[in-house]
Image (cartoon, rainbow, N blue to C red):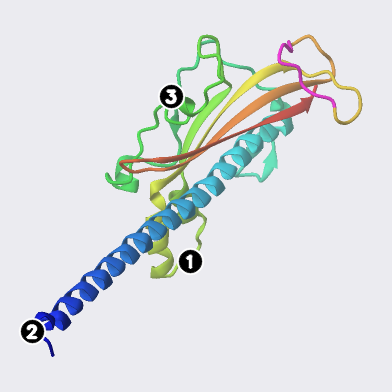
Amino acid sequence: MKANEKGFALVLSLVLMLAMSLMGGALIVISAGDHKSNNRNEDYQQVFYVAETALFEGEKYLYNQFMGPWNTSTHKRNTSARSLPANKTSVYTGGMTAKNYTQNSVGKENYLLPGPLCYNSYRDIDRGDLKVVISESWNFGVVLKDSFRFATQDEKDEVDKLKKYYYQYFITRIGSAPYRGSGSSVKKGANNTGKDGMAYRVYGCGIKHGSDPTVVALESVVVLPK
């Protein structure tokens, strides 16, 4: 071996080791980024399903008022109390009524103050004149827990994880919704003088509580016949 070639194998080994270390580090960073992205996508999907629950519950509330409140004791509807619920007189600012949870029932780390988080997720609301029929906040994990008649320890542990998920909805009565046949639309300037139906808009949110909460906001329109 020539004198000027001494130590070449050592230098080459160091260069290859450095290159492999850089490649390994890059793969770790890419893998961690993909894992984080997958977690975000999974969170979004779960919160989206909870938001769909919010819409369903809001629509169910309107149906129950229209058909007559359900009496859980007699298992019958009070048809004499049927109504098309009206908006409250005060302008709505985003507050919610916590229906099935307290800080003690869900734990301090999971407790979501029933404030305007859902309300603030909608940009096209007329905040100076919005009036609502009702606004409610429900803990998704507690709803599931209450639905269990019997539960294994694994199921109880899973429900505890879901106590960081909430669904919230608020409903506004839009006004009269005259329509002729199928496919007609509800006009934005509708009032209460029509004879065909009454329109309501349901705003529903799914929320994963945390330091950086995930919120999915959905909405639908329900028309009830007069």
Q: Is residue 189 magenta?
A: yes
Q: Nearer the viewer, residue 126 or 105?
A: 126
Q: Position of residue 119 (x, y in %)?
A: 48, 26
Specify whether 97 is left or right of 53.
left
Label 1 neighbourhood size at 10 Å, few (<14), some (14-19), many (20+)?
few
Mark nearer the viewer, 1 or 2: 2
Label 3 neighbourhood size at 10 Å, few (<14), some (14-19), many (20+)?
some
Q: Which residue is mark 3?
A: 95
Quadrant of the image containing the C terminus: top right
Q: Which residue is mark 1?
A: 150
Outermost residue to the right: 181
Q: Which residue is mark 2?
A: 3
The earlier-in-sequence mark between 1 and 3 is 3
Which region shows up in magenta?
184-191
Q: Amino acid at mark 3?
A: Gly
Q: Quadrant of residue 222?
A: top right
